[in-house]
Image (cartoon, rainbow, N blue to C red):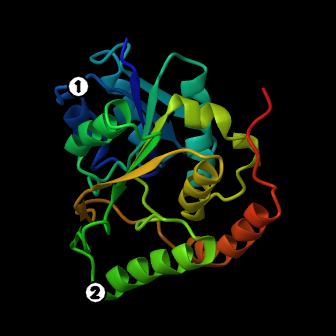
Amino acid sequence: MSDSLVIIPTYNEKENIEKIIRTVFSLEKDFHILIIEDNSPDGTAQIVKSLIPEFQGRLFIEERKGKLGLGTAYIHGFQWALARNYGYIFEMDADFSHNPADLERLYHACAFEGADLAVGSRYITGVNVVNWPMGRVLMSYYASAYVRFITRLKVRDTTAGFVCYTRKVLETIDLNRIKFVGYAFQIEMKYTACKLGFNLKEVPIIFTDRTEGTSKMNKRIFKEAIFGVINLRLRGITGKIKARKA
């Protein structure tokens, strides 16, 4: 059994899903994959299910009733992973914006370099983003700077969604108290882990915008990330971020 589980949330990813699954399984390290599928009308779930016999015991799917938010998808996946014997749990997009080969580098940071949480960072060595218009690059970069200013997080890429958690981190965080469901979820998880004393390491990656399928970013998600960090900082100051009770 692999010690590593890659969680991939999906909604309308028929163009990418088989390719991303096969690419992860082609890596030298043995990873398992859990797809969190939010009732895609394009047949994404059927594609995944058709691959399960080929990758028996390595590929899994959890189907939900609809689009319930990125954060709740990952929380569902974390709880699924914790109920099993996985030591390293990854977040990754289905659209190849994250290079699957970098999974091994994130794993190495946690397994051999002392990180409790490894982040695939677009901004730790400058701005490493491909195929984004300049306006979106600037918005993302300065949004991360804003988050650092408000939260005092010493993380260059606060909204990064390419992450490896050690089991210890997810066992310690009270996942039922994580409030955000959009991209602010990524900020909240990093902030909570740091407040609980875990060691976070940024691993430089090149982020490539999707070439197939459509982006799930919208104004509501962006507003949650901008305004939610103030509440997050207040919760940190007032001591409301606590470890899960055993």
Residue 112 as seen in the image, left or right of residue 148: left
Camera-side residue of 203 and 223:
203
Residue tagged 1: 29
Residue tagged 2: 134
The residue at the point 70 percent across, 51 percent down is 178
Which of disc 2 and disc 1 is earlier in sequence?
1
The residue at the point 25 percent across, 57 percent down is 205
Q: In this view, does 199 lie above or below 45?
A: below
Of helix, strand and loop, which one carries label 2? helix
Point out residue 199 in the picture as x, y percentages from the top left corner.
49, 46
Point out residue 51 in the picture as x, y percentages from the top left corner.
31, 25
* Residues packed near mark 2 inside 10 Å, few (<14), some (14 to 19) or many (20 plus): few
Quarter of the image with the N terminus is top left
The residue at the point 31 percent across, 65 percent down is 122
Badge 2 amino acid? Met
CA gap between label 1 and label 2 equals 36 Å
